Image (cartoon, rainbow, N blue to C red):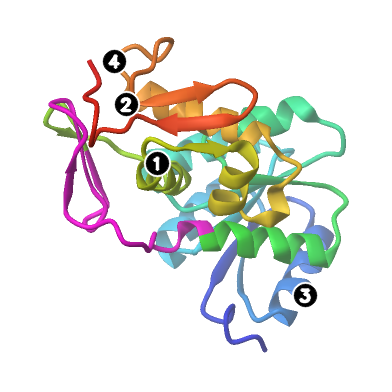
Amino acid sequence: MPEETKRYKILVVDDEERMVRFIRINLEHDGFTVVEAYNGKQALQRLRDQTPDLILLDVMMPDLNGFEVLEMIREISNVPVIMLTAKGEEDDRVRGLELGADDYITKPFSQRELVSRIRAVLRRVEGVGGSMHGLIEVDDRLKIDFDRREVWLEGKIVKLRPTEYRLLYHLVQNAGWVITHDQLLAKVWGYEYRDEPHYVRLYINYLRQKLEKDPANPKYILTERGVGYRFVDFRREKPS
């Protein structure tokens, strides 16, 4: 049993018992603890009772579908969620990410892909480490304290999901320098995601919506077209 995974509890939500059994066998083989739910109501109850470290959530379910369940989850928890989507359903994948999913896996998938995706997401939500300490005053509007995992905008705490927080950390850590799409994918999502550039664009947009006064004309997170993104160098210039 791999030491690195045996402490993680995964909630598997799917109305197909064979799929749940397949996932359970493979995850337990890799040292995960598995909790089962077969519909949306059970999933929400398991979330409250079992406090899983990650949720695998099927899209196509009767009564409450995966998107409706995800919206309810996000009202009460930032637990990472990986959506299970049908092959070729690009709209499902985009919608899931926009509603707050951390990733998606397309059916059918292999044991190796499943475990790799789960580990990658769990790595992202582990505490951000690094050399940035103390309160960072970007300007009069925006203040960040990575030690306390707090972001303040105009005197109020901004709620960031784990992936948004990790992305912000790497942008601020390299303030004034351009970080390429590939570098951000590797640092924030992991090398498994090198062929998923849309993640960067989507989460940059999330951060801008939460932090920028005018997201269409950002002052903090700047686009270097065709290359990547640059966080304003607040140590030399103050955003207006």
Residue situated furthest front in the rendering: 236
**Disc on res. 168:** 1
Q: Are marks 2 and 1 in contact (CB under 8 Å)?
A: yes
Marks 3/2: CA–CA distance: 42 Å
Marks 4/1: CA–CA distance: 16 Å
**Could you say which is closer to the camera, residue 237 or residue 120?**
237
Residue 113 appears anywhere in the view: yes
Q: Which residue is mark 4?
A: 213
Counting from the top left corner in percent of width and height, residue 128 is at: 39, 59
Q: Which residue is mark 2?
A: 211
User: Callout 4 environment at 10 Å: few (<14), some (14 to 19), or many (20+)?
Assistant: some
Q: Are marks 3 and 1 in contact (CB under 8 Å)?
A: no
Counting from the top left corner in percent of width and height, residue 112 is at: 81, 66
* The C terminus lies in quadrant: top left
Determine whether the residue tagged by mark 3 lies in a helix, strand or loop.
helix
**Disc on res. 25:** 3
